Image (cartoon, rainbow, N blue to C red):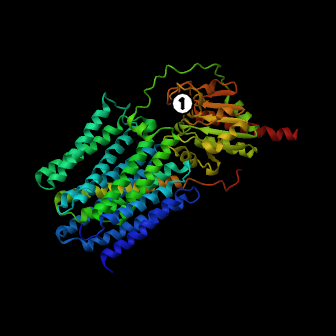
């Protein structure tokens, strides 16, 4: 069997395993097996590609031993560093690490295209165009993802905006196209090298400029978009180097990532173009409507006991829960309620957490079974016959103004109908406003009580209150 | 890259077309609960880029080509390993409530 055929067949097996694995990842029951299958596929194709050592073209034979050593070093360093950081990162910091790894993939895709520009003088016109496309998309994904990582990791401050931002970005994009056309026209020599360098600089700059103005709340959509970008760049690279596995895997991610981006944006009531080209957070917040009623503080123990004797409790967690590291305590409390025969469900808003689905992962980490987690559409009808809704560290996603207040910046965003429950308890750190800077009418509603304090401490008191009750109960029976 | 299987422009478009539909179909019915792991999972799948980088490094004919290829393999390896570890960590946490609550 020829070397080439062996690699192609291994690639076929890998392509099947990657796609089938991704398919299994789309249901919670089979998801873990899915990533294992995809991992096996990836291992097969990486190992098989080493056989290419036997089949290196004659022009590249010189120094092959050194190149093999360098490849092993690069693989060891890259795998080692990423496996180490990936294992250590906290689940709360997951979004920015996904962005960082994705940016590196974009960088690798850009490198493949750059290598092609360096070595491939005998390419046809289509090849040149596709190579340049792959190079620019990969570069934008690299620099954009790194900016996204730095922002979510708190290494960059407030969104950076200048007057005429769109014109600046448009100018850089025009320069990018012009440099690309220059590379295409010259195709070789020192002039081409200079133009190619300018081309990469413009692409990297565009990624930075396009990402800097975007606010933290919109960042997940951007990360998902760059994920699709990297996939697209990898697919185009696959065409350039004539490798079908890269073409298939890259394009599958390109389209899956695009769809995922649209789904996330829809869940957040934002359009992708809105995210990229408008500046969220610069809305006049002084025009917020008048809110009647008053805030009614409650004791943690009272809230706990009320829930202990309720028939049905729905919990609406927000990022404040994870910020206080209180997921474990919450689940401990939930288990006590379940043991007392209370029906408990979690209502997960699509944007609870730092990215869609992030809250599910954070709760799963604490051991909460996924069949207790319900999406907005599944559970919103149920609030009306729920005795108690418990809101923890969430604000904007339960703000009824989103339904009624046309002047509100969150108007139109789908919210959890927590206000329809018979009784509402809100655990909140202080009297501050939410991410969008809007007052929350829910907190002033007649059936709502506020439990102020750190979520971890409040939940500990609530657990304590129920346990004390449990200890008292047998004595009552004995008496 | 003349040693590779030649894939003509139109055949490439066929492959791209089918891959785009496949990606769309695979993702279209995913519940919101899995959005984050799935994004990470697809991040892992495009880590296949490390294979292309490996070819670029091994087939390089100049010092510059070797340097670019080296960084390609380094970044690609980080992509594939990081995304795998993170995705696996997230997904192994998802458990159904088979054990009755105590």
Residue A6 in the image: above or below residue A35: below
Tell me which corner region of the image, top left, top right, bottom left or bottom right, holds residue A245: bottom left
Q: For the C terminus of chain A, which image quadrant?
A: top right
In this image, A314 relative to B9: left or right? right
Q: Residue furthest bottom?
A: A1
Observer able to see residue B20: yes
In this image, A412 relative to A9: left or right? right
Q: Under tag 1, what secondary structure? A: loop
Image point (47%, 46%), residue name: A262
Image point (42%, 48%), residue name: A98
Residue A298 in the image: above or below residue B4: above
Chain for numbered disc 1: A
Q: Position of residue B84 (x, y in %)?
A: 44, 57
Residue A329 in the image: above or below residue A101: above
Tell me which corner region of the image, top left, top right, bottom left or bottom right, holds residue A18: bottom left
**Residue beneath disc 1:** A411
């Amino acid at each position: 069997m020829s070397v080439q055929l062996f690699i192609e067949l291994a690639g076929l097996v890998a392509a099947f395993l990657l796609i089938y694995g991704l398919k299994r990842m789309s249901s919670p029951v089979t998801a873990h097996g899915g990533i294992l299958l995809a991992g096996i596929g990836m291992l097969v194709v990486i190992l098989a590609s080493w056989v290419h050592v036997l089949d290196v073209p004659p022009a590249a034979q010189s120094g092959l031993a050194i190149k093999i050593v360098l490849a092993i070093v690069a693989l060891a360093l890259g795998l080692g560093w990423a496996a180490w950081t990936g294992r250590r990162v906290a689940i709360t910091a997951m979004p920015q690490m996904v962005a960082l790894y994705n940016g590196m993939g974009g960088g690798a895709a850009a490198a493949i295209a750059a290598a092609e520009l360096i070595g491939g003088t005998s390419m046809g016109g289509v090849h040149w165009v596709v190579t340049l496309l792959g190079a620019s998309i990969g570069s934008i994904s690299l620099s954009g993802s790194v900016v996204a990582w730095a922002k979510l990791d708190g290494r960059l401050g407030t969104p950076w905006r200048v007057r005429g931002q769109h014109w600046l970005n448009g100018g850089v994009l025009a320069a990018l196209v012009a440099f690309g056309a220059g590379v295409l026209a010259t195709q070789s020599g020192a002039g081409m090298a200079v133009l190619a360098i300018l081309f990469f600089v413009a692409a990297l700059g565009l990624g930075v400029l396009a990402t800097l103005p975007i606010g933290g709340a919109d960042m997940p959509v951007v990360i998902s978009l760059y994920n699709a970008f990297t996939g697209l760049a990898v697919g185009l690279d696959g065409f350039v180097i004539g490798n079908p596995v890269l073409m298939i895997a890259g394009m599958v991610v390109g389209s899956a990532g695009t769809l995922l981006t649209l789904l996330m944006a829809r869940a957040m009531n934002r359009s992708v173009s809105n995210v990229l080209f408008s500046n969220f957070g610069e809305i006049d917040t002084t025009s917020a409507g008048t809110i009647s009623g008053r805030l009614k503080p409650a004791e943690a123990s009272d809230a706990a006991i009320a829930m202990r004797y309720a028939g049905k409790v729905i919990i609406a967690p927000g990022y404040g829960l994870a910020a206080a590291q209180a997921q474990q305590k919450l689940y401990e409390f939930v288990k006590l309620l379940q043991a007392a025969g209370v029906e408990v469900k979690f209502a997960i808003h699509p944007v609870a957490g730092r990215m869609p689905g992030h809250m599910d992962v954070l709760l799963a980490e604490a051991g909460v079974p996924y069949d207790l987690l319900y999406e907005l559409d599944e559970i919103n009808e149920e609030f009306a016959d729920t005795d108690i809704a418990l809101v923890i560290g969430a604000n904007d996603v339960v703000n009824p103004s989103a339904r009624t207040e046309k002047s509100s910046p969150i108007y139109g965003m789908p919210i959890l109908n927590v206000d329809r429950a018979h009784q509402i308890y809100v655990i909140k750190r202080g009297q501050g406003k939410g991410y969008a800077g809007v007052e929350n009418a829910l907190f002033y509603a007649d059936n709502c009580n506020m439990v102020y304090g750190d979520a971890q401490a409040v939940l500990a008191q609530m657990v304590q209150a129920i346990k004390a009750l449990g200890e008292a109960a047998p004595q009552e029976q004995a008496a | 890259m003349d040693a590779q299987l030649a894939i003509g422009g139109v055949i490439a478009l066929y492959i791209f077309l089918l891959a785009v539909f496949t990606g769309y179909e695979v993702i279209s019915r995913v519940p919101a609960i899995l959005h984050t792991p799935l994004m990470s999972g697809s991040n892992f799948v495009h880590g296949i880029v490390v294979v292309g980088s490996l070819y670029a490094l091994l087939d390089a004919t100049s010092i510059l080509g070797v340097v670019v290829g080296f960084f390609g393999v380094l970044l690609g390896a980080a992509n594939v390993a990081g995304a795998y570890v993170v995705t696996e960590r997230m997904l192994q946490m998802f458990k159904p409530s088979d054990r009755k609550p105590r």
